[in-house]
């Protein structure tokens, strides 16, 4: 999941002070849009419009902040906390629009605009957080909140979250320390955006792709070959060259990279592609090695300024885990549980490969997916391609959306009267069981050149209630990178892609279902080690026959997935779970290694060695020279997961335990679903563990996760 680059306070919306701005009438980012539901006319917006909207939005929010600070009235919840929460409509709208569209399109003019405004946004946010008059008012409300009997629990939650957010952002600092915090925040913001844009640019660099002939594609399924041929045709056209039907193009973007690593019989080409991927951002124009060192060191300096010995200690203050020690203990417990099963899996795969390749064959990282797939196919009579005919995209959309229908009664209606930032985007109205409009959902499914890799959920407008208690409808977006259709061919998804779709849709439901009064507490504005519960929960349904039978039909025959194929898929889903977990733990250990440093990285520091040392406790293969994760690890160096990557596994413990409640009562049990929906609707209005215990009746344990992965019987 991806957030906008400024925090919730700077992106808050809907009540602004009037501004005498002449340009507002011509720029809907400033004046507001008269399109249906207040959606934006993306096709009419230029990079200059986004930039203008952000600059004017900062000006307007400054007026709003001044109005809060200049009033003579005693600070109260309404005139200080609520007024702050509702400030920044124009800014929030403009930043969300620019960051979301830039990420989904890779448009160079938008990337330039983002680079221009990022330091301005960082300075603006820091100015708010270090505004002493504003902080004094917030502190007065916080210190006396228990004296006001009219405040609800949600009101007090907002006061507490606002206070802690300011405190965490340096509000208690004095004199030179305040200015130092300001300088470091600006520097970090610039480095984050530089890292992210370097990743995007290097991923699409022509040097990081393979031009191949059909003879190089032995083992590759026909549907994947067609995608490689289409990619070649598109790339040649972009370069102004005549199409050459003998050429195929494989890139390091996941929809292209993963199938090649799984199916290609050419070990030499798998190795070459692996090393192209692993060397991303390690040299040349888009080298991120020094950038990541600078980010790490600035974060450490910032943490020290705040009285913490390392950045993780600072970053984890307001999370479920709270301390680096808790995180490392959690990761260590998983390492202890999964290490031997992982070693057994890898040994089995190597033994299987040696039966085909000879006794001296040594399994390498570029071999794992290939031989894993071969063994899985032989052992379970299952191949990932076997399921693809049953996951035609349009039926799968119906099935994924239908999960919310079965659980919560939601209905989805595709609409055509909404402007979109790209022709591939689909837009849906989402309705509650009683017919009330819940919100709007954008869905952007297909890979295209320049689009950021991976998949994510974001929002153009968060839910909240206006002054009259009326719900402001959320506008939510999910973005994926599925292969585009070739001609009139059906778009068929593999199981991993369906799982990704379910995951991001879970985040979308979190945003759509929100029933919070205040935007700062709505939807996905929760602790990062809680937010993945709702996305990962959905993934559990991918192995449930009762669910799959409702939509997974062969795109030609219309038949359901055969019982034996589904049984083999379910059996095979546990095979490789230990490897996958250890791989995730490797990312978590690496994240914590950078962010528990108590001394800065030197310019001469060897990042390959640092990474190998950090991941040694969960090592699967020996490190490959020149191939690292760090230089393109956007989650921790530009994506908001610094000292937080553990949150994925933390949330897996939650989601496995939560789904066990459904397995005990029925996977579509209405009473259990209603209790789970309460968590979806609550956002951050209550402490996460309190919400979870209310749903489950107890704290989660790791047992359900170990059982699901076949580690514990």
Image: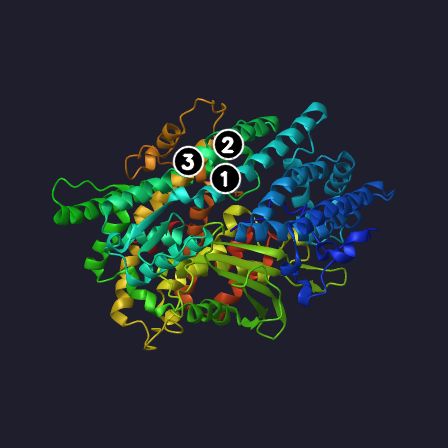
Task: Answer with mark 3 or mark 2, whichever residue precedes in sequence.
Answer: 2
* Front position among marks 2 and 1: 1
**Looking at the image, which is closer to me, 552 or 22?**
22
User: Whole-Å distance between the Cαs marked 3 and 2?
Assistant: 16 Å
The location of residue 442, given as percent across then percent down, is: 56, 62
Color theme of the render: rainbow
Q: How many marks?
A: 3
Inspect this view and state whether residue 272 appears. Answer: yes
As drawn, is 151 to the left or to the right of 455? right
As drawn, is 167 to the left or to the right of 232? right
The location of residue 83, given as percent across then percent down, is: 76, 49
As drawn, the residue found furthest toward the right would be 72
In terms of image quadrants, where is residue 231?
bottom left
Q: Residue at x 42, y 71 (%)?
A: 395
- Return the residue at label 1: 198
User: Whole-Å distance between the Cαs marked 2 and 1?
Assistant: 10 Å
**Looking at the image, which is closer to me, 487 or 356?**
487
Above or below: residue 568 compared with residue 337: below
Element under disc 1: helix
Task: Answer with mark 3 or mark 1, whichever residue precedes in sequence.
Answer: 1
Q: Badge 3: how crowded within 10 Å, few (<14), some, or many (20+)? A: many
**C-beta proximity under 8 Å, tags 3 and 2:** no
Q: Badge 1: how crowded within 10 Å, few (<14), some, or many (20+)? A: many
């Amino acid at each position: 999941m991806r957030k906008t680059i400024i925090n919730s306070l700077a992106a808050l919306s809907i009540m602004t002070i009037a501004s005498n701005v002449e340009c507002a009438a011509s720029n809907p980012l400033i004046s507001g849009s008269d399109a249906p539901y207040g959606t934006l006319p993306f096709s009419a917006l230029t990079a200059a419009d986004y930039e203008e909207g952000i600059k004017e939005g900062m000006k307007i929010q400054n007026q709003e902040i001044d109005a809060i600070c200049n009033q003579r009235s005693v600070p109260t919840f309404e005139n200080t906390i609520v007024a702050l929460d509702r400030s920044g409509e124009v800014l929030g709208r403009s930043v969300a629009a620019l960051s979301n569209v830039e990420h989904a399109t890779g448009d160079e003019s938008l990337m330039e605009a983002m680079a221009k405004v990022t330091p301005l946004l960082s300075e603006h946010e820091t100015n708010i957080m270090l505004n002493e008059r504003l902080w004094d008012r917030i502190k007065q409300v916080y210190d006396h909140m228990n004296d006001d009997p009219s405040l609800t629990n949600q009101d007090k939650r907002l006061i507490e979250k606002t206070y802690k957010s300011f405190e965490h952002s340096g509000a208690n600092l004095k004199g030179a320390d305040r200015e130092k915090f300001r300088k470091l925040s600006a520097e970090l913001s610039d480095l984050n955006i530089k890292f992210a844009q370097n990743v995007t640019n290097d991923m699409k660099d022509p040097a990081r792709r393979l031009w191949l002939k059909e003879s190089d594609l032995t083992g590759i399924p026909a549907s994947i070959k067609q995608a490689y041929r289409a990619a070649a045709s598109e790339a040649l056209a972009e370069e102004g060259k005549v199409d050459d039907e003998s050429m195929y193009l494989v890139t390091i973007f996941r929809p292209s990279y993963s199938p090649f690593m799984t199916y290609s019989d050419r070990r030499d080409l798998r190795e070459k592609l692996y090393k192209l991927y692993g060397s991303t951002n390690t040299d040349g124009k888009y080298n991120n090695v020094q950038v990541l060192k600078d980010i790490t060191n600035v974060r450490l300096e910032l943490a020290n300024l705040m009285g913490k010995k390392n950045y993780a200690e600072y970053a984890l203050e307001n999370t479920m885990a709270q301390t680096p020690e808790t995180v490392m203990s959690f990761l260590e417990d998983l390492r202890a549980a999964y290490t031997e099963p992982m070693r057994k899996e890898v040994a089995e795969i190597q033994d299987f490969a040696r039966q085909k390749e000879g006794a001296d064959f040594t399994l390498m990282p570029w071999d794992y997916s290939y031989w894993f797939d071969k063994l899985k196919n032989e052992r379970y009579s299952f191949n990932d391609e076997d399921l693809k005919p049953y996951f035609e995209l349009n039926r799968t959309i119906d099935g994924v959306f239908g999960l919310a229908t079965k659980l919560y009664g939601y209905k989805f209606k595709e609409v055509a009267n909404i402007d979109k930032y790209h022709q591939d985007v689909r837009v849906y109205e989402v309705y509650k069981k009683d017919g009330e409009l819940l919100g709007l959902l954008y869905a952007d499914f297909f890979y295209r050149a320049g689009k950021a890799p991976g998949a994510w959920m974001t929002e153009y407008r968060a839910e909240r209630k206006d002054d009259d208690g009326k719900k402001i409808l959320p506008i939510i977006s999910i973005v994926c990178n599925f292969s585009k259709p070739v001609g009139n061919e059906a778009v068929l998804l593999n199981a991993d892609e369906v799982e990704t779709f379910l995951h991001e849709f879970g985040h979308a439901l979190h945003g759509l279902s929100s029933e919070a009064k205040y935007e700062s507490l709505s939807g996905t504005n929760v602790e990062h080690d809680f937010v993945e519960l709702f996305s990962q929960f959905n993934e559990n349904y991918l192995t449930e026959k009762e669910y799959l039978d409702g939509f997974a039909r062969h795109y030609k025959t219309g038949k359901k997935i055969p019982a034996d194929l589904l049984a083999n898929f379910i059996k095979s889903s546990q095979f490789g779970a230990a490897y996958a977990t250890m791989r995730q733990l490797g990312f978590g250990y690496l994240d914590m290694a950078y962010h528990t440093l108590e001394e800065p990285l030197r310019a001469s520091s060897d990042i390959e060695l640092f990474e190998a040392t950090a991941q040694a406790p969960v090592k699967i293969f020996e490190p490959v020279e020149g191939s690292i994760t760090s230089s393109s690890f956007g989650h921790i160096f530009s994506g908001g997961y610094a000292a937080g990557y553990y949150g994925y596994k933390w949330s897996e413990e939650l989601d496995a335990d939560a789904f066990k409640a459904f397995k005990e009562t029925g996977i579509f049990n209405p009473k259990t679903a209603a209790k789970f929906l309460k968590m979806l609707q609550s956002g951050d209005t209550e402490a996460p563990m309190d919400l979870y215990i209310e749903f489950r009746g107890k704290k989660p344990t790791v047992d359900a996760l170990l059982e699901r992965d076949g580690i514990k019987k």
